[in-house]
Image (cartoon, rainbow, N blue to C red):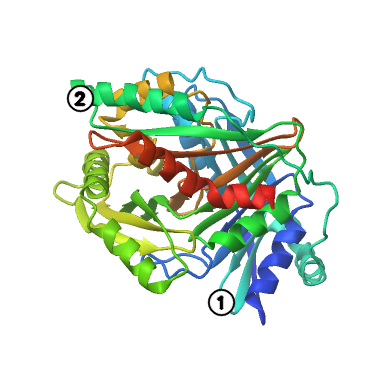
Amino acid sequence: MPLRTTKSYSINNLPDFKEKLLCWAQQFDDFVWLDSNGHNDTYGGFEAVLAVDALTAIKTDYNNAFEDLKEYQSQTNDWLFGYLTYDLKNDVEELNSKNSDGLEFPDLYFFQPKRIFIVKQDEVILKYLKMVDDEIEKDFEAIKGCGKKSSNNSTNDIKIKLRIHKDEYFDKINGLLEHIHRGDIYEANFCQEFYAEDTVIHPLETYLKLNAISKPPFATMLKTDDKYLLSASPERYLKKVGKKIISQPIKGTAKRSHIASEDAVLKENLDNDQKERSENIMIVDLVRNDLSHTAKSGSVQVAELCKVHTFLQVHQMISTIESQLRDDVHPIDVIKTTFPMGSMTGAPKISAMKLIEHYEETKRGLYSGAVGYFTPEGDFDFNVIIRSILYNQSKAYVSYSVGSAVTSKSDPLKEYEECLIKAKAMREVLEN
C-alpha cells in the first residue's frame, strides 16, 4: 500500500471551506468532488471528499474493462476515484452502443490521486502521497485564499434542443408498451437527451448553482481533461463496507409544492401510488437477484421497501437492499455482476437494455453510469449519474438526460411530464 502523509486542520465555516476547496481544485486536469450536502447517511461516509492530481490512471473502452480495472485496483492497492459509464454493459453482455455521442467520455476512467481531502463537519483530513507531502502547508494556505471567480465566458442565451420531440416520444413509449404487453419485458427505463451545441459554460459556477437548487446526498463534480460532470444525484448505486453490500435504487418521483399542505398530499399520493410502488418493487427484485451472485447464501435482505424521501426539488421512492459478501469475491466482481444498476435499465435486464438501445437516440455514456471511489482496503461507494449536466469543453457541447420507468400501467403523457419534472433543475441552471 503506498504511503500517505495524513494531516488535519480545523474548519470554522464548512460551506465556505467547501467552495474554496472546489475552487482550488479547478487548476488540475483530473479531480473528483463528492458532496453529501449534510444528508445523514445511515451507512456512514464523508461530508465531502476531493481527490486531485493523478499519479496513475486507467482509461479504456468497454472491451475487457472490468478485468482491466480489477488488475489496476489490485496492483495499485490505494485510493482510486473515477467513473463507470452505462456502456460498460457491453463488457458484461453481448450488447452494443451505436447511438449518437456528442460528449465522447471514455467508457471507464479511474485515477490514483496524489492529494485527497476528506471533509468532516469541523475538520478536513489531508492524505498526500509522500512525493508531494512537502506541499501540504502551501496547498492549505492557497485553499484558504481561494475565491470563486465570476466568469464572463459563459453563453448567456443557451438554446436547448430536444433529441426526441414530444410526438416521437409518445410513439416510442407506445412501442415499448407493445413489448411489455407481449411479455418481452416488464419494465424499461427510457431516457431522452436535451442538449446545446456551440455553447460555453463555466463548469464551477454551473455546478454550484445546480447543487444549491437540489442539495442532494450524492452530488458530484468531476473533471478529466476537457470533460466535466456536474451532478445533483440523489441516488446511491452500490456501497461496500467490509463484507456488507448496500444498494439503494430509486423508482418513483413526485414534484414538490411550496405550500406545505399541498406538498404533504403530493408525498402521500406518491407513497400510495400503486404504479410507482410496482416499478420500485420490480427493481428491488432485480437488485436482489444481482446481489445473490456474490452474496453468502440467505444474506440478501430488503432493509427498506418503497420509503418516500424528500429532496428540495422532488419526492422520491427509495428502497434499500443489503447482502453479505462471500469471502472469495473480489470487490470489482460485485460491481460487474450488478452493472448497470437496475433502476436505469428495467427488467428483465438484458432484454430491457436491448430495447433501450433500439428506442433511445443517444449513447448514454456517463449518464446512468456511476462515479465513486475505492479505498485501499477494497471498500467502495458509487452514486447513480442522474440529474446531471455533462460538458465537453473542446466541442462546446452541453447535455443532460432524463428518463422514466415504463410499465404496463404507464401513460405516455404522464411519463413525459415526469421527465420534465426531473429536467427542471438542469434547465433552470443553464437558462438562468
270 or 48: nearer the viewer: 270
**The image quarter in which residue 317 lies:** bottom left
Residue depicted at 42% across the width and 22% down the height: 359
| The disc label shown at residue 214, or none | none
Res. 31 visible in picture? no
Above or below: residue 51 compared with residue 11: above
Q: Which residue is mark 2?
A: 181
63 or 68: nearer the viewer: 63
Q: Which residue is mark 1?
A: 121
Residue type for callout 1: Gln
For mark 2, give the secondary structure.
Answer: helix
Residue 15, image x, y percentages? 64, 72
Residue depicted at 28% across the width and 59% down the height: 269
- Work out whether mark 1 precedes mark 2 in sequence or the reverse, and give the earlier one: 1
Label 2 Cα neighbours within 10 Å, binned few <14 / some 14-19 / many ≥20: few
Label 1 Cα neighbours within 10 Å, binned few <14 / some 14-19 / many ≥20: some
- In this rendering, position of residue 26 left or right of residue 247: right
Farthest bottom residue?
Answer: 12
- In this rendering, position of residue 376 left or right of residue 280: right
217 or 44: nearer the viewer: 217
83 or 403: nearer the viewer: 403
Above or below: residue 259 compared with residue 235: below
Residue 191, image x, y percentages? 45, 33
For mark 1, give the secondary structure.
Answer: loop
Res. 148 visible in picture? yes
Residue depicted at 83% across the width and 60% down the height: 149
Eye-nearest disc, 1 or 2: 2
Residue 236, image x, y percentages? 41, 52
Residue type for callout 2: His
Residue 86, image x, y percentages? 47, 33
Above or below: residue 365 compared with residue 299: above
Q: How far apart, in angstroms, are the residues tagged by discs 1 and 2?
A: 51 Å
